Amino acid sequence: MKRSVVLRLGWPVLLAAVFAVLKWCKIITWSWGWVLSPIWIIAAFWLFVLIIVSVFGYIYNRKT
């Protein structure tokens, strides 16, 4: 039986990797903040969703 390992990376990680390679090859001159922006933008989005859900959950549980 053959074992296979599946590495699941989301598109933000792959895009950040492409940007990093382009920066290391000096094709783009962006700062590292923008090179890694696909990762931190998605992280900020999910943090925002978590905060909104937490606030609504707190308000809902407070009224009951």
Image (cartoon, rainbow, N blue to C red):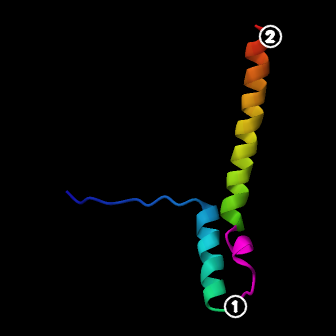
Q: Residue furthest top?
A: 64
Instruction: Pick the residue in front: 40 or 15.
Output: 40
Name which quarter of the figure residue 10 lies in. Answer: bottom right
Point out residue 20 in the picture as x, y percentages from the top left corner.
62, 79
Q: Earlier in the sequence, mark 2 or mark 1?
A: 1
Q: Is residue 28 inside the magenta stretch?
A: yes
Left or right side of 20 for 31:
right
Instruction: Pick the residue in front: 19 or 44.
Output: 44
Point out residue 57 in the picture as x, y percentages from the top left corner.
73, 23
Q: Residue beneath label 1, please?
A: 27
Quadrant into which the C terminus falls? top right
Instruction: Pick the residue in front: 52 or 8.
Output: 52
Residue plotted at (74% across, 40% down): 49
Point out residue 58 in the picture as x, y percentages from the top left corner.
74, 22
- Secondary structure at numbered mark 2: helix
Q: 13 above or below 31? A: above
Report the amino acid beneath label 1: Ile
Q: Residue furthest left?
A: 1
Nearer mark to the viewer, of 2 and 1 = 2
- Label 2 Cα neighbours within 10 Å, binned few <14 / some 14-19 / many ≥20: few
